[in-house]
């Protein structure tokens, strides 16, 4: 089993339990590395245990193979020590433990490296077993509440246009925003073996708090913004910001690119370690900024830029990506040229066009700040009304629900509340929490397809309908059951059918 902690995304992590280590690290070599970063690490086993070779690392007993180090992570819902015997039976040759999982049984013959915190030590173990793959790559790590996916996608596109072999890692490439440490290090090792030169990846606050990116020193760290999210995990906004701020410490990145239009970006600039290069980005420096349904234009480093992403929030995202690529040595003219043909990021202000005389936009916005940015951007697209369809996910930060309702009421002319992955919670209770923050009289339609149909059927020529919350997602989770549901496909189907506007 996988005793993983929860993250901002859903589903089971798709990991890589093998991959890319050139020569096997021995248990003894790993112990020495662990002892340097996790004092007190010790080995249970006979003298021959130190010579045992390790070829892969995992914390999921279902993905153990020959030569695996199995990490007995103590999670929120499960304890990896309880699956140690299953892992050994599947081929694990050593265990990383916090306690002896089998004091009197046959596991005593398996080398056990004992540490105080398996989750923290697991990252070091993965870095060692996969031979420090990040050191053989140019790396960009992007953190922040909103915009991470767009910035990572833009960075990857610009670097690729400049002739680099690039890989993006994030919300669109896996079930978690940032993979667990063994999966991440295995993937980086595979990329090195495949000849990849640059990696742009999203770095979530969960990843920083749960040691997923320990051992990676990013060449460039990017901060987008900080809004309200994940307080169910972090507890307070201060703890949430502190988690993200770790990425800008000297031991985690070599330079920072920061959006200073956000107050937390200014705090990061003010608290940067001495000698740590930091670049401030502000949309104020991009004026004049224009935004239409087909994109935006602005100035960057004295150059005129056209970008197919609408909205001032996307101008900020494009500027952050441009600065990150410049920091990696890409020529400014090449950056400007690449920004002009950025691909649409799935589910990020993605238009649905079936020939209707009003705009339809699908966006992943699921925080108050993100929803506000998208609705403001939609307002800029024309003189018509803005209609919004959205809900809030279950089993996640509940404190943001009334704020989401308030933001929708302030920035949209028509508000339609519906479900958005209620998971184990009662959808009607979630809707009532969102409605409590609304002013006026929003439409409440729990069936998401019907809610989208209501909004489309109410749209007039020149209006913009924003379908928010799920973006690129292709499923809807209700009471533990995931059924196919893609806002983009549903909207297109409704627009083409009698269910939509006539």
Image (cartoon, helix red, strand yellow):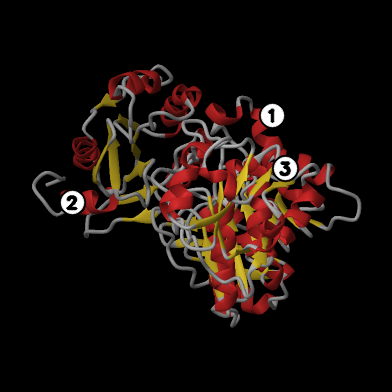
Residue at 61% from the left image edge and 37% from the top image edge: 100
- Screen quadrant of the N terminus: top left
For residue 473, the mark is none
Crowd class of label 1 (few under 14; some 14 to 19; many from 20; radius 10 Å): few
Q: In the figure, residue 339 lies in which quadrant?
A: bottom right
- The residue identified by callout 2 is 495
Q: Is residue 497 left or right of residue 271?
A: left
Residue at 67% from the left image edge and 66% from the top image edge: 25
Task: Determine the secondary structure under disc 3.
Answer: helix
CB contact under 8 Å: marks 3 and 2: no
- Mark nearest the camera among 3 and 2 is 3
- The residue identified by callout 1 is 238
Give how far across and how far down residue 445 sits, in percent: 23, 28
CB contact under 8 Å: marks 1 and 3: no
Give how far across and how far down residue 209 sits, in percent: 64, 40
Label 1 or label 3, whichever comes before in sequence order? 1
Task: Determine the secondary structure under disc 1.
Answer: helix
For residue 245, the mark is 3
- Mark nearest the camera among 2 and 1 is 1
Label 3 or label 2, whichever comes before in sequence order? 3
Outermost residue toward the left?
Answer: 498
Q: From mark 3 to mark 2, how far is it between C-alphas? A: 44 Å
Q: Nearer the viewer, residue 136 or 267?
A: 136
Q: From mark 1 to mark 3, how far is it between C-alphas? A: 10 Å
Q: Is residue 257 left or right of residue 318?
A: right
Residue at 58% from the left image edge and 49% from the top image edge: 109
Q: Nearer the viewer, residue 85 or 445?
A: 85
Q: From mark 2 to mark 1, how far is it between C-alphas? A: 44 Å
């Amino acid at each position: 089993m996988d005793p993983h902690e929860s993250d901002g995304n859903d589903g089971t992590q798709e990991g890589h339990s093998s991959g890319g280590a050139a020569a096997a690290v021995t248990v003894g070599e790993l112990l020495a590395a662990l002892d340097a970063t996790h004092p007190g690490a010790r080995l249970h086993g006979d003298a021959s245990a130190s010579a045992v070779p390790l070829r892969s690392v995992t914390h999921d007993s279902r993905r153990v193979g020959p030569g695996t180090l199995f990490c007995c992570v103590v999670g929120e819902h499960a304890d990896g020590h309880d699956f140690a015997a299953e892992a050994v039976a599947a081929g694990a040759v050593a265990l990383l433990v916090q306690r002896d999982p089998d004091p009197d049984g046959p596991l005593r013959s398996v080398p056990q490296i004992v540490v105080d915190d398996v989750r923290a030590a697991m990252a070091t173990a993965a870095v060692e077993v996969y031979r420090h793959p990040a050191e053989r790559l140019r790396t960009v790590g992007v953190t922040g509440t909103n915009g991470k996916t767009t910035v990572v996608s833009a960075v990857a596109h610009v670097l690729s246009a400049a002739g680099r072999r690039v890989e993006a890692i994030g919300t669109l490439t896996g079930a978690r925003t940032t993979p667990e440490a063994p999966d991440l290090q295995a993937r980086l090792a595979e990329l090195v073996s495949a000849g990849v030169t640059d990696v742009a990846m999203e770095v979530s606050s969960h990843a920083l708090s749960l040691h997923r990116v320990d051992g990676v020193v990013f060449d460039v760290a990017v901060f987008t913004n900080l809004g309200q999210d994940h307080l169910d995990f972090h507890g307070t906004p201060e703890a949430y910001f502190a988690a993200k701020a770790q990425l800008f410490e000297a031991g985690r990145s070599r330079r920072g690119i920061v959006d200073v239009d956000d107050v937390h970006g200014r705090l990061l600039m003010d608290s940067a370690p001495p000698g740590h290069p930091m670049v401030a980005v502000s949309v104020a420096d991009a004026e004049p900024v224009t935004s239409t349904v087909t994109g935006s234009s602005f100035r960057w480093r004295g150059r005129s830029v056209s970008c197919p992403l609408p909205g001032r929030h996307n101008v900020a995202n494009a500027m952050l990506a441009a600065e990150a690529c410049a920091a990696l040595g890409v020529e400014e003219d090449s950056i400007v040229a690449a920004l002009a043909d950025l691909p649409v990021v799935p589910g990020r202000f993605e238009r649905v066009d079936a020939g209707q005389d009003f705009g339809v936009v699908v966006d992943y916005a699921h925080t108050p700040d993100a929803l506000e940015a998208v609705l403001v951007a939609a307002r800029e697209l024309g003189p018509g009304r803005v209609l919004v369809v959205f809900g809030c996910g279950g089993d996640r930060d509940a404190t943001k629900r009334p704020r989401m309702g308030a933001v929708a009421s302030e920035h949209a002319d028509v508000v339609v509340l519906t479900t958005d992955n209620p998971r184990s919670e009662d959808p009607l209770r979630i809707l009532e929490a969102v409605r409590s923050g609304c002013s006026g009289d929003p439409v409440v339609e729990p069936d998401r397809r019907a809610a989208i149909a209501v909004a489309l059927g109410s749209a007039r020529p020149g209006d913009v309908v924003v379908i928010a919350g799920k973006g690129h997602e292709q499923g809807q989770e209700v009471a533990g059951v995931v059924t196919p549901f893609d806002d983009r496909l549903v909207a297109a189907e409704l627009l083409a059918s009698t269910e939509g506007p006539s």
